[in-house]
Image (tube, rainbow, N blue to C red):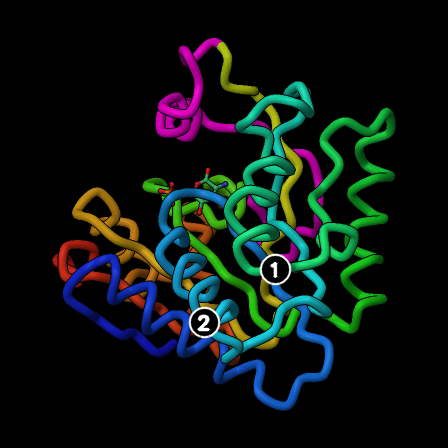
Amino acid sequence: MEVIIVGNADQVGQVAADKVIENLEGVATPVLGLATGSSPLSLYAELSRRAKEGIVDFSHGLGFALDEYVGIDPAHPESYRNVIHRTVVEPLGMDPDRVRVPNGFAEDLQAAADEYDDAIEAAGGVDVQILGIGSNGHIGFNEPFSSFSSRTRVEILTTQTREDNARFFNSIDEVPTHCMTQGLGTIMDSRVAVLVATGEHKADAVAAMVEGPVANVMPASILQFHPNCIVIVDEAAASKL
Ligand code: GLP
């Protein structure tokens, strides 16, 4: 695990963009793993700027989002399908037909989850997985006590995660109770993982992920065993390291 500490969120985005691009060099069809949340927004903005300048081209790339709410109206602006489209697909100039989000609307959710893992494998695996971290240490929506070998599946959201995400909805009652998420095992299969975090409210989770024991009470700690994981944080998020 390589840890890079920079001054602010914009610099997190710039350094993370350098790392993403560096690790895609020579890859004909880049396969990106995509995170939602506010943490990677400065990274996506920076990748978008560089795509518009012609420094990098994502138009033939493939994308696999980490997660989706189960049971949310697909037209809801906060469904991850819509969030990924708005914050990643359009700004990076990706082909919407080549970017997938777990199908939280499927009748048979586990079949849809299995098919999602198969699609990642058929694409040759994820080259660069972009990650944020929840304040409780989740990655994707792998909540505390998720199995380290888990694959894409349905999970129950913790109260803390629902409270954290209530800001995107009118009230906590509107926040879905379930999600479909890539598993920790799925995430660990990525060739490179780039995790970004900013702000003091992430400091405990970042310290536990980087310096704590590898234990599934802190799901992100499994990244200590990832063969190529780069953690980019601002000073506030690094304050408890
Ligand atoms: C969300 C997502 C995660 C994200 C995390 C942190 O609920 N499912 O993929 O990394 O929680 O979000 P934020 O970056 O907004 O703090």
- Image quadrant containing the N terminus: bottom left
Compared with 107, 174 (above or below) is above
Residue at the bottom extreme of this rendering:
26
Task: Return the disc, 2 or 1, that comes first in the chain's sequence.
Answer: 2
Query: x, y (%) of residue 191?
Result: 60, 76
Query: x, y (%) of residue 199?
Result: 20, 49
Query: x, y (%) of residue 220?
Result: 43, 56
- Whether label 1 lies within 8 Å of ligand 1 gets the answer no
Compared with 67, 120 (above or below) is below
Query: x, y (%) of residue 114?
Result: 82, 47
Identify the residue at horizontal 64%, vertical 90% (top origin): 26
Q: Quadrant of residue 79?
A: top right
Q: Amino acid at mark 2?
A: Arg
Q: Quadrant of residue 113?
A: top right
- Spatial CA distance of label 2 from label 1 is 11 Å
> Seen in the image, is 234 located left or right of residue 73?
left
User: Helix, strand or loop at disc 1?
Assistant: loop
- Image quadrant containing the C terminus: bottom left
User: Helix, strand or loop at disc 2?
Assistant: helix
> Seen in the image, is 177 located left or right of residue 217?
right
Q: Which residue is mark 2?
A: 50
Question: Where does the magenta region start and end?
Answer: 146-173
State if disc 1 and disc 2 touch (CB < 8 Å).
no
Rendering quadrant holding ligand 1: top left
Q: Amino acid at mark 1?
A: Gly
Q: Residues within 10 Å of mark 2 (few under 14, many from 20)?
A: some
Q: Which residue is mark 1?
A: 93
Identify the residue at horizontal 71%, vertical 42% (top origin): 102
Identify the residue at horizontal 21%, vertical 70% (top origin): 5
> Seen in the image, is 85 located left or right of residue 151?
left
